[in-house]
Amino acid sequence: MSQDFSPDQKRYLEGFVSGVQAVRGSRGLPGFGGAPAFQTQPATNAPAAPSGPDAAHLEAMARFEREGRKLSPQEIAKREEHPFDAYARFKTMAKENRFAKQLDDFRIRFHGLFYVGPTQDAYMCRLRIHNGILRAWQFRGVADLARQYGGGYSHVTTRANLQVREIGAADGISFVEGLVDLGLTSKGAGADNIRNVTGTPTAGIDPQELVDTRPYAKEWHHHILNDRSLYGLPRKFNVAFDGAGRIAALEDTNDIGFQAVELRDGFGVAPGAWWRLALGGITGHKDFARDTGVIVPLDQAVRVADAIVRVFIRAGDRTERTRSRLKYLLDAWGFEKFLEAVEAELGAELTRAPAGAVAPRPESDRMAHIGVHPQRQAGHNWVGVALPLGRLTCEQMRALAAISEELGDGDIRLTVWQNLLISGVRDACVAEVERRVAEIGLATSASNVRAGLVACTGSRGCKFSAADTKGYADQIATHIDAAGLVVDTPINIHATGCHNSCAQHYIGDIGLIGARVPVGEDDTVEGFHLLVGGGFGGDASIARELVRDVKGEDCAAVVEKMLRGYLARRSGPEETFAAFSRRHAIDELKAIFELEGA
């Protein structure tokens, strides 16, 4: 979700803060942010250096200003008042039944609350759940909070997380504090912070994994929570751990991706499991995290991640929001210069993997997040539950918690595919789990089209979205299934509402990005631009644009044409949709899909 201010707000901020800073400086008062950034020393009359946990951020801001560059309004807002210092004021606002808006809307996102007007006059709260795994009683507790304070439902997100909507102005802080009572938190789940830490959803139970990612995601999660200096980055920051299990964690779409690899013997480094370090993923800007050539001992991941983030804190762009992500610092510096800065921060050299040292990683299974799959523990299974584009009612959440406790191991495992797994189900209990899941209106099986369908919140709940992504995505799957069209290979269809690409449309076999489609001379309707050929992991590729300005109501029929053309003209049953689309030029695909006039 974008965090930019309107032009009027920017002008107000720049004038207001400049004036106030000048007045405070003339009176010898401390600067904003709680650090004496503008205080003078009696002996030398020189500015004092910032101090405290916010010092690196304040110094970075000051450096850009010394260079004659204007800070973004968000940076000025953070310096004026650190969002964590505004908590008492937010509690007062809740008592007065007032939403945090304008500058405070940005600040309150540090606490996980987002004011989502005008689409909904309400807050949305996003949690942070390390590795996407929580206990059944916590899952039930979130359902109770959503019922008491929210709209009575939740969504599983594309970061293996939960978010709850329709929270009233008076209830936002109560919801956040209720999460803490459950041993959960939303701290830092929004704005310029390190977001929810993802990991392999089948960690510890996966028969092919190289590394159980749970302890590493947990360690990084608590490292962040307990260090204020890791908040207020130049822009949001994503970190993921992929243990090479059967369900992908999409670590290559993150700023930092730790990929479990096996090192062969005889290459001058200790054989066994290591992390391979990938940096700079941001697929909404058409870039995957790239292999740095660096390998990291398993127990050093948090130390290395911390150093990377601190280099980004000091050097990341704080003036232009569209270029404030890690990718753009890597583009400007190059990987070697950046890694040298990381080594300086660490006070030690990073280890490089010699050519040929890394064994091929096991491939993920694009359908392993749905249905019944055997665990590494003999006689036990995980059961993937298909959710309607991530949505769950509170009643369904409570029922799933009961199923997990009574017939599984008590874990609820969320995935980046907007669904969840019930793990630890004994062979003898599988049929009962499937029956009880069906009783609450959910399923443990789905067509390949519906199983691979991903959609962001869309215009029903996000002011930046140009289309009702969830509504039209559901129409696509319903239409394809009703037409009796069977796609016998995995297929991912990703629908996102705007260029922030929360649903990562560039990595879908078919990607849709919301657009206002012209109709007549003076009107527009909701619709999409369609892309083809995206992929992830070992098949990583950025999708190409196929056709523009398809009305939302026409998308299902267009996707049907695309799938029928693929099935009729593919080289064989093993050729995936992505491979098929990549070996044809766009004009050829338009002809095959009968979209010549589009």
Image (spheres, rainbow, N blue to C red):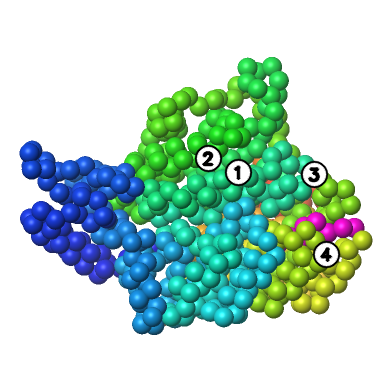
- Coordinates of residue 499 in the picture (x, y in percent): 47, 60
- Looking at the rendered image, the quarter that the C terminus falls into is bottom right
Q: Which residue is mark 2?
A: 302
Instruction: Answer whether labels 4 and 3 touch (C-beta < 8 Å).
Output: no
- Compare residues 229 and 114 and report the one nearer the observer: 229
- Coordinates of residue 534 in the picture (x, y in percent): 62, 51
Give the side of residue 487 with respect to residue 335, left or right.
right
Magenta stretch holds residue 513: no
- Compare residues 184 and 541 and report the one nearer the observer: 184
Q: Is residue 228 above or below residue 414?
A: above
- Separation of disc 4 and disc 1 at Cα? 28 Å
Q: Earlier in the sequence, mark 1 or mark 2?
A: 1
- Separation of disc 3 and disc 2 at Cα? 25 Å
Magenta residues (range): 420-427
**Secondary structure category for the residue under label 2:** helix
**Secondary structure category for the residue under label 1:** helix
Give the side of residue 14 with respect to residue 275, left or right.
left
**Secondary structure category for the residue under label 4:** helix
Q: Which residue is mark 1?
A: 216
Disc assigned to residue 407: 4
Q: Residue furthest front?
A: 181
Foreground mark, 3 or 2, reads 2
- Separation of disc 4 and disc 2 at Cα? 35 Å
